[in-house]
Image: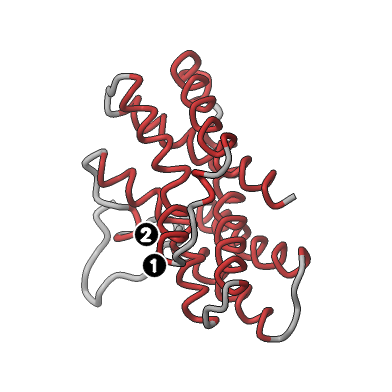
Amino acid sequence: MSELLDLVGIFIFALTGALMGVRKRLDVVGMLVLAEITALGGGVVRDLILNVPPIAFQSLGYVLTPVLATVVVVFWHPHVARVLPAIMVLDAAGLGVFCALGTEKALALGLSPLHAALLGVTTAVGGGILRDILAGEIPTLLYDRQLYAVPAMLGSGLRAVLFEAHLQGWVATLAAALIAFVLRISAMRYGWRAPLARGVTPSD
């Protein structure tokens, strides 16, 4: 079940990476690179920190799913762009799933709750950071419009707290993913963002 959720999240993240390639007028190779990096980058960084073989290199599905997403965007990107609001809802779901599963994996390997939560956040947002850097953008993590990192932090933190309370299994993972999802969707709906320094006005 967790692998299926992983693949769904990977597909959605890869779509956003490939769409970034379209906006940057990259060729199909550039689009594929952004799709792969967006979808797999956070998990690869997490696994390297955990000193375990990255799961992306142990399953063809993890590598081929971004290829499929890129093909979809190459041929049907106007249609994909039109359903972008729905994709962003699914992206929020992927954010929740990845932060919860990333935290869970780190906890299972013996990390402290704090460090496991940090790796959960890395799993959820790391690919997006790498995508933005490669595309020449300021990583959205640094200005967190409509709250992206904050929901991942809360979801990862909740998963770690539940682990410490000896509440484990899919219910705990779902609860952590759900709180991240709801906060992200609410931020998109109401325009919430992380606070700026005192006296600084937003640029948008």
What residue sits 41% from the left and 30% below the top? Answer: 18
What residue sits 51% from the left and 35% below the top? Answer: 63
- Residue 193 occupies which quadrant of the picture? bottom left
Residue 81 vs residue 203, the one in the foreground: 81
Q: Which residue is mark 2?
A: 144
Residue 42, x across and y down, in percent? 44, 54
- Residue 51 occupies which quadrant of the picture? bottom left
- Tell me whether the residue at label 2 lies in contact with that at label 1, contact meaning CB atoms closer than 8 angstroms: yes
- The amino acid type found where label 1 is placed reads Ala
Disc 1 crowd rating (10 Å Cα; few below 14, some 14-19, many 20+) is: some
Residue 74, x across and y down, in percent? 44, 17
User: Can you name the residue that lies furthest to the top here?
Assistant: 75
- The amino acid type found where label 2 is placed reads Asp
Residue 57, x across and y down, in percent? 49, 43
- Residue 17 occupies which quadrant of the picture? top left
In this image, 104 relative to 204: left or right? right
Q: Which residue is mark 1?
A: 194
